[in-house]
Amino acid sequence: MAQKLSVIPLSYVTRVFGYLRPHWRLAAGSVALTVLSSLISLLAPWPLKILVDNVLGPRPLPETLAWLLGPLAGQRSQLLVVAVSAGLVVALFSNALHVLTNYVNTKIDQWITLDFRSHLFLHAQRMSLAFHDRRRSGGIIYMINSQGDAPAGLIMTVPMLAESALTLVGMIWVSYHIDPTLAVASLAVVPFLYYSVGFYATHIQDRLSKVRNMEAESLSVIHESISMMRVIVAFGREKHEYHRFRQQTTNAVAARVQVTVRQTIFSLVVNMITAVGSTVVLGIGAQRVLQGQMTVGDLLVVIAYIASIYKPLETISFTIGSLQDRFISLRSTFQLLDTEPDIKDGPEARPVGRVAGGVSFEGVGFSYAGRQDTLRDISFTAKPGQVIGIVGPTGAGKSTLVSLLPRFYDLKQGRILIDGKDAREITLETLRQQISIVLQEPLLFSGSISDNIRYGRLDATQDEIIEAAKAANAHDFIMRLPQKYETVLGERGAAISGGERQRISVARAFLKDAPILILDEPTSAVDSKTEAVILEALERLMAGRTTFMIAHRLSTLHHADLILVLQQGRLLEQGTHQQLVDAGGLYAELHQAQIGAKRPKLQPVAA
């Protein structure tokens, strides 16, 4: 058993108890209450012994107790009241301590769970986009929500085990002084319990790990389906997703039932072992009473103690058994915490103030996992305030190129310079403060319009939010809404249209006021009228900023200072619009194709 439980590194246990340090006062109170509860539990059988031996039986009270009770010890009626009252007082104190202990331990449990889940959540946000591309979101959500209580669960077993151990030692000691034979006989079940726990721990961990993975997969199915609800409804695949969820969850339920059956059998084995032990002790004790070697009161005390001895033994056995579930969760969560972020500040990274916006790519290369040469040998220079257009066929690497600038991914070769300084020598926090992004799909939170715009700068005033909205051509439609700036947008901004969502995204970028701007096809999903409104706002936003604009419609790039033409990860051409048209390369072909698509088709003349 010890070997199997040692699969959890000692460092994990040390780290778990590190979360207890901020709550040491509560922990000290829990320790004190645990000791008091153990002492009170030792007193529980003694009022019954006095009642049987000294009230109902002929035996006199022990001298010390008779001296303490004084005149009350001389009359049985008064002694009866004392014994019954003492039993009531012990029960009252025991239950009061139980309530207080539960209160303190619950506070410890909840605070540690909150601290650990917060740590997991923060670490998951620090991981790179490449990490999240490889992991299913539902699995991470399951880990934070369902496995985030593992450290608190492990810590809270300590008071339970400590109280059981203290009670066990105290009751064995008292029982041994009453009758050594019964005390020793009561411990005969310990080896059987030990090997039962060892066998259970050996055979349950792999099953628990499998069940946890299946339950995490079930949550992933739910998360994916909810996030893809528009696609599901559009294709009428509600029943398909329902059956996919049912199939996955049915397998998880079946696996959980199998594990629960094994846990129940383990509980049955432990209960039967302690029941056999109680029967043996009762038989031996009754024989000794018949032989006059102990009184009925002594037997009742010993039986009460033995029953109480077996209760902590059962608690210890069940707790050690249940720890396997905690250990599985701990292993998963600490593996996440031990995963180093792909992108982090290097030892040479330093914060910077507002940059001018000069950007240079020097021999930049990048590859996704399992896909080589997504970008190869990209070199160009953008001066502060210039507009850089980026065009190319689908899959050419346009979005990947601009994603390297804020270090969403780290390049494999070359370097990116900002104002002549390697981007990797700038802290991630201050690097990303220099860059605003407006994406093709406007990503909004479910809060109010004000909250979504304020996300660009959290300390912005309401007047600044309104000014940003006006600059983004969003103020007028916002004021027509019933709740105006306090309108709650719902999931992903579902309460307003796509063009309106995009204007809020532009307002957010205005409010951030970063010197470098990335526009990833921000008007590709809107109609021509809405596009004109957004482009007008974007022209104001681009003023004075170094702008990287990915565009499908080449007409939006005619005035760009430099246009980059990508194909299959290579920088095929670069120059101004007119230079590239005159060169007759890929850009000229794309330009000609779009001009041809706009010309009206000639209608055949009727004969």
Image (cartoon, rainbow, N blue to C red):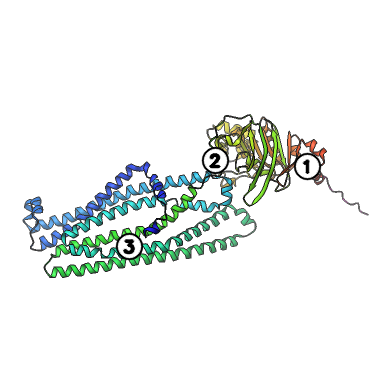
Asked if residue 542 lies in the magenta stretch, the reply is: no
Residue placed under numbered mark 3 in the picture? 194
- Which image quadrant for residue 314? bottom left
Q: Nearer the viewer, residue 294 or 442?
A: 294
Q: Which mark is nearer the camera, 3 or 1?
A: 3
Magenta span: 599-607
Amino acid type, label 2: Lys
Residue 8, horizontal then vertical, whole percent: 42, 54
Residue 439 visible to the viewer: yes
Q: Secondary structure at mark 3?
A: helix
- For the C terminus, the quadrant is bottom right
Q: Nearer the viewer, residue 182 or 144?
A: 182
Q: Nearer the viewer, residue 488 or 203?
A: 203
Residue 144 visible to the viewer: no
Question: In whole angstroms, how far apart are the C-alphas of marks 3 and 2?
Answer: 47 Å
User: Residue placed at 39% from the left, 61% from the top?
Assistant: 201
Amino acid type, label 1: Tyr
Is residue 85 placed above or below 458 in the rendered structure? Answer: below
Q: Secondary structure at mark 2?
A: loop
Residue 397, horizontal then vertical, whole percent: 68, 45
Instruction: Tell me if mark 2 has few (under 14), some (14-19) or many (20+) residues whose alpha carbon lies within 10 angstroms of its own.
Output: some
Q: Counting residues from the N terminus, which is met first, the one under dot 3 or under dot 1?
A: 3
Residue placed under numbered mark 2 in the picture? 344
Q: How many marks?
A: 3
